[in-house]
């Protein structure tokens, strides 16, 4: 049983490494950016746009843009984004 668990863990770590490598591949990044541009251009929404980026250490940074006011929040934590959004809706 323990051997099976170790084998599953190893497979999970190998898959996680492949996923990390794929997400850093230039073609994947270009495809993701093109898809995002297409979705944004087809949806003329007044809702804030949110996205994340991973830095080289694997930390998540949040980005938000309000299409109405043009205000931005960059390299923020999830908490900072929540506060920013709450302030936006309580003006």
Image (cartoon, rainbow, N blue to C red):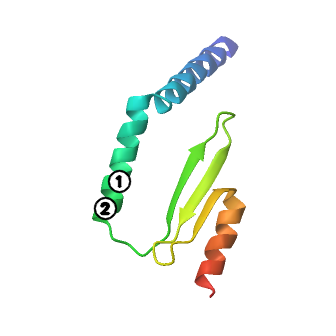
Tell me if residue 25 comes above or below residue 78 in the rendering: above
Decide: few, some or many residues near mark 2? Use Cα within 10 Å; few <14, some 14-19, many ≥20. few
Q: Nearer the viewer, residue 15 or 77?
A: 77
In the rendered image, which quarter is residue 84 located in? Answer: bottom right
Residue under the point 70% across and 56% down: 77
The percent coordinates of residue 55 (x first, y second) are 64, 39
Q: How many marks?
A: 2
The percent coordinates of residue 60 (x first, y second) are 64, 46
Tell me if residue 81 comes above or below residue 60 in the rendering: below
Please give left or right for residue 29 compared with residue 5 in the image.
Answer: left
Q: Nearer the viewer, residue 35 or 74?
A: 74
Please give left or right for residue 30 compared with residue 68 in the image.
Answer: left
- Tag 1 and tag 2, C-beta contact below 8 Å: yes
Q: Which structural element holds mark 2?
A: helix
The percent coordinates of residue 63 (x first, y second) are 58, 57
Decide: few, some or many residues near mark 1? Use Cα within 10 Å; few <14, some 14-19, many ≥20. few
Distance in Å between CA atoms under marks 1 and 2? 6 Å
- The residue carrying mark 2 is 41
Please identify the quadrant where the C terminus is shown: bottom right
Residue furthest out toward the left: 42
In the rendered image, which quarter is residue 14 located in? Answer: top right
Q: Which structural element holds mark 1?
A: helix
Please give left or right for residue 31 compared with residue 66 in the image.
Answer: left
Residue under the point 52% across and 23% down: 15
- The residue carrying mark 1 is 37
């Amino acid at each position: 049983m323990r051997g099976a668990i170790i084998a599953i863990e190893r497979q999970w770590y190998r898959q996680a490494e492949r996923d990390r490598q794929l997400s850093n591949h230039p073609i994947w990044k270009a495809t993701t950016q093109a898809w995002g541009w297409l979705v944004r251009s087809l949806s003329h929404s007044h809702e804030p746009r949110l996205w994340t980026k991973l830095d080289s250490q694997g930390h998540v940074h949040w980005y938000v843009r309000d299409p109405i006011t043009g205000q931005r929040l960059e390299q923020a934590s999830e908490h900072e984004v929540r506060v920013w959004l709450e302030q936006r809706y309580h003006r």
